Amino acid sequence: MPMDREVFERDFHRLFNPRSVAVVGASNLPGKWGFNMPLNMIGGGYRGELYMVNPREKRVLGFPAYPSLKDIDAEVDLAVIAIPARLVAEVLADAAAKGIRNAVIVSSNFSETGEEGARLERRVADIADGAGITIVGPNTMGIYSKTSSLCCLGAPVFPRKGSVGFVSQSGNLGVQLMTWGYRKGVGFSRFIGSGNAANTDISDWLEYLGDDPETDTIILYIEGIKDGRKFLEVARGITPRKPVIALKAGKGRQGERAVLSHSGSLAGPFELFRGAMEQAGIIEAETTEELVDLAAAFSSLPVPRGARVGVMTLGGGWGVAAADAFDREGLELAVLPDEVIGELDRFLPSFWSRRNPVDIVGNVQRGNHYRVIDALTACDEVDMVITMGTLLGRDFWIENMFKTAVRPFLNMVRHRIALLPFFQLSMWKGFRESLKRGGERNPEGSGGINPTEAWKWTDTALIRRLKRLMREKGKPIIAVAVNEGESSASFRMRNTGVFTATTPERAVRVAGKLARYSRFLASRS
Amino acid sequence: MPMDREVFERDFHRLFNPRSVAVVGASNLPGKWGFNMPLNMIGGGYRGELYMVNPREKRVLGFPAYPSLKDIDAEVDLAVIAIPARLVAEVLADAAAKGIRNAVIVSSNFSETGEEGARLERRVADIADGAGITIVGPNTMGIYSKTSSLCCLGAPVFPRKGSVGFVSQSGNLGVQLMTWGYRKGVGFSRFIGSGNAANTDISDWLEYLGDDPETDTIILYIEGIKDGRKFLEVARGITPRKPVIALKAGKGRQGERAVLSHSGSLAGPFELFRGAMEQAGIIEAETTEELVDLAAAFSSLPVPRGARVGVMTLGGGWGVAAADAFDREGLELAVLPDEVIGELDRFLPSFWSRRNPVDIVGNVQRGNHYRVIDALTACDEVDMVITMGTLLGRDFWIENMFKTAVRPFLNMVRHRIALLPFFQLSMWKGFRESLKRGGERNPEGSGGINPTEAWKWTDTALIRRLKRLMREKGKPIIAVAVNEGESSASFRMRNTGVFTATTPERAVRVAGKLARYSRFLASRS
């Protein structure tokens, strides 16, 4: 009934910036929703008033407990309801009487479980519509709002503050993606676990986030949409200004069935939906992991002007792994002009690939990595750059020091101790020699490392250079750190705010989506 | 010229178990191959004899330096050659004269760079063929062998010892995947970076690994195959006994081009190759990341009897994310018999999904998780189990303790200090109450946690249970730990030897490949 829902004006401002929150069904029992949610609000640093409602307790989590909403002798901006489904309607009537405009209804056992639950849900929605109450849920994990530090969530998740707005039709999945985001350095402005959406549709939230000055990038987890036309219309109004990224669930026969039993939504033919999304400029994420990657990338990289990619790789195999995904992602390996080839010829070993992907065949002279990245980014035929083997990461340094210095030394001591003085002498001699050579070009081989450029070997130096290049040229550069774990990439994102990838395939997928958005923007101008 | 290459009998035993290794082009200069490779052998713990060959040095890395191979007055099982391409033929002639049967040729600038390099490579191969020398390379990153602790590799990678044999047509990619494997707890028996494969083909290595008692699972990174018929014939002889997993590079137009410029191989139409691989029972990995996942899974999980999967999830969204990938992977959501539904009805909240995926709607009573997993694994309609939200991981515990206990406490101290004594009293009261209730069933809600089952909340308890179930029922159980990073899954694999996944989609992909292998095995019996 989309018509009915339009009769009242919503008060989203107070939903996301409540001066006071009442928790109905507040509990001292660990693990219950009425225990977890207020605890998470306290832990999250919410500073407004908190009222606990529980007729059987004197105090809940230290706060005085009220028998009902009506007994709270103060204004309440938001009611959080965590009681059995059959009792919700009555509480909502109380909320209406109190003039509360927003309710987060956590309770399950509504329309997701069948006809009886659906009837109950309609009754609750009718009361809400009549009283102008916006319901988040029922069957929701709650909401998050950066501006009020409101972690009104069923799970102990305190999102990183940032500019990504997130609407999720699965609460569990939503809060976990915020945890992934936390680790990966992705910050959120708002989160809405929309649940059964008794008197809202995803368009309502999308519209709000579209206008929200705290939100720069919007991500959606969608199982089903009630009013597809409206959704696309709202999206079309936002995508020219802010990227909107959606993971659509319920793909294929078995996915559709799973959606039906989860949120009761009819997923509908996915291919149709995909086409409509693309027309509206919505970026599609194919997996949960990709949704977080894209949130990180779109909120930290510039939008490219086209789909031509320059690839630099320390070893040919990674270049192939990247290029393999190009067709699928609609990307083009940029054709390098002769001038660029000639420029790279001047310092790379003679047997470098001499085309894109630029395979620098294990050349570890760091200055050369920089020169290749500079040349690719400056080239007019290149819209974006993927670089593999340049970014090394903390893990690499820690492990590398141990492996190339400590372990051989220990093994000399243990098994070939007579050689040890000669070993140390050799190392010292070699180090002095490479200092003297200072990275001179060796067309027939690697030439070894150049210790005088040691300062260039840190991630900080590289990322600083990439940031400057991206700003100057307006082209995204995606560094892939294949030689380290997820944690270093996350560490980097948290500390530098720049997205980096841990596999070539993931970098290419992100590049493909950036190119798609660029194509959409170009088609509109 | 596959004919020529068959004329001599190879000595793979001494290649992987050399009593002595000579490094031609050994160097004291950090970053050069002649420096890195012997250093990595020393660091890796190789205990055989090491000879350094360099006419311009007295000592290299502490070892006395010989002017040439001929000057070494002892038997040499393996020559490692890291000198400019144009000098290799002469060294190989020396090796032939010395009766050396195996050479790892690191040098680039051979057939991968064009016609001139190809001529040089043919000359080297001719010498080798004539003298019965097996060449690894040229243009290789080297080899690894568990039995001799031989890290004859260009990068500081000391693989974990295990049962996975690995042939990679890209050295760089190969050694990095072993690093990923190291982190993820995947151990290797042998590694061969086959490089330009001057007088070998991938079938030679595959055949060796097929017969190798140290190798239980074989993984391949393939860019091109010279003799496809022979490769498939060899594979067919192995796949009924050992899983063979292949990542085929050079997919699509741009991937093919990248392969051509990397190893000079003609990739050929991928779809044809894919069909042939499937017929031979080779499992296809689609990305580098998946190759490592599959190595971990196939070396640690039983092969299922079919493709019917039972899914348990703590929240519906993750169940949908998993089911979404089922069609694509050829998996079936198992249809649960009424008895199983009835059994689960007895302890789950009334609003659980009552079908597969078994959505236990946030029920955090740990004993119930166990009962669902037991019931699914015991069910005859289920060939394998995916469980999401049960596995919690170290990260979760560390974060959760902080978030549900420390942070709220600190915020009470900082902002609501007057409430603190009441807060502590409430917590204590709640804890005692839930001890008393002991996880009684609450059909209308979660019922809270049951502190008496605290011992069940550890990963160790869960994994122990899963291991026992897998052994008893011969069905793989893939636990997905969505609430934590890659590092915890790796930690678990390293410590328990059981593969776990970090996203539902990755779990489903692995399950799909297990089912495919099961189908192949069934088709043969």
Image (cartoon, coloured by chain):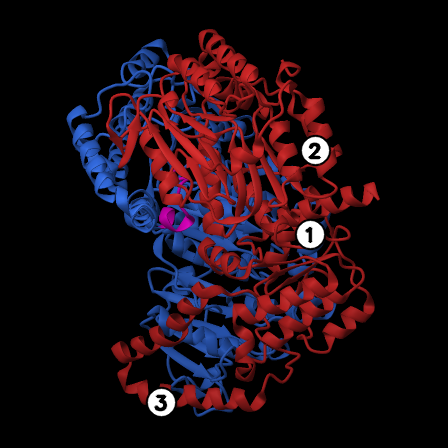
Chain colours: A blue, B red
Does residue B389 lie above or below A420 as drawn? below
Q: Residue B206, position in %: x, y?
A: 63, 33
Task: Between residue A350 and residue A1, name the one nearer to us.
Answer: A350
Residue B522, image quadrant:
top right
Q: Which residues are magenta?
A: A480-490
Which kind of residue does numbered mark 2 sit on? Ala
Question: What is the spatial separation of the Cα atoms under label 2 and label 3, in whole angstroms?
Answer: 70 Å
Q: Amino acid at mark 3?
A: Phe
Contact check, label 2 and label 3, Cβ < 8 Å: no
Label 1 is found on which chain of the structure?
A
Q: Residues within 10 Å of mark 3 (few under 14, many from 20)?
A: some
Q: Which residue is mark 1?
A: A266
Q: Secondary structure at mark 3?
A: helix
Q: Which residue is mark 3?
A: B422
Q: Which residue is labeled 2 in the image?
A: B235
Picture coordinates of residue B386, whole percent (x, y): 65, 58
Q: Which mark is residue A121?
A: none
Picture quarter with the C terminus of chain A: top left
Q: Residue at x 57, y 55 (%)?
A: B499
Name the spot of residue B151 as percent of width and height, x first.
43, 39
Q: Nearer the viewer, residue B338 or B67?
A: B67
Front residue of B415/A79: it is B415
Figure check: B257 above or below B156: above
